[in-house]
Image: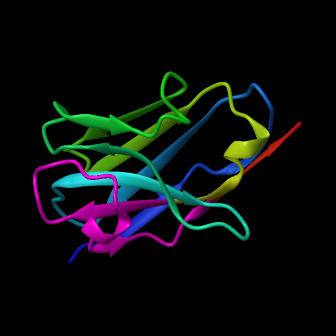
Amino acid sequence: QVQLVESGGGLVQAGDSLRLSCAASGRTYAMGWFRQAPGKEREFVAAISWSGGNILYADSVKGRFTISRDNAKNTVYLQMNSLKPEDTAVYYCAARPGTFVRGTATEYSDWGQGTQVTVSS
């Protein structure tokens, strides 16, 4: 089990950019970002394999968000560009005990506390 700590959230205007970071207490394998807006279920955003060679995005963020990782720092990033009000949510990073990327929350065993992203129109 690893501890995950997200950072980088904030209040921005539509069209702005933010970069989220997720620092892990130890080595992780496949990692993912999820988000949850008020009154909605947690939804998949992006996932990356340990090597970075396999990446998966939700259709809603494809072309705007980029997931990456620095294994030397045990850190995963989510670069979010062209933000929209509908991107407003608490963003969580998660780790799963496997090398394959997955888009389902139940596939992940460790979760961070989340960081709030608010996009105003």
Quarter assignment of residue 39 = bottom right
The magenta-colored residue range is 92-115
Specify the farthest residue to the right. Answer: 121
Dividing the picture into quarters, in which one does residue 47 lie? top left
Residue 94 included in the magenta stretch of the image = yes
Task: Tell me how many marks there are.
Answer: 0
Outermost residue on the top side: it is: 63
- Left or right of residue 69, residue 79 in this image: right
User: In percent of the image, x 38 and y 71: which residue is there?
Assistant: 111
Q: Looking at the picture, how far across and down is residue 90, in whole percent?
A: 62, 61
Q: Nearer the viewer, residue 31 or 104?
A: 104
Left or right relative to 115: residue 73: left
Between residues 59 and 19, which one lies in front from this camera angle?
59
Quarter occupied by the N terminus: bottom left
The image position of residue 9, as x and y in percent, is 64, 51
What x and y, as percent, mark residue 73?
26, 47
- Quarter of image, res 28: bottom left
- Residue at 72 percent of width and 50 percent of height: 88
From what the image shows, is residue 41 above or below residue 69? below
Farthest residue, direction bottom: 1
| Horizontal and vertical percent position of residue 92 | 49, 61
Q: Residue at x 65, y 30 (%)?
A: 17
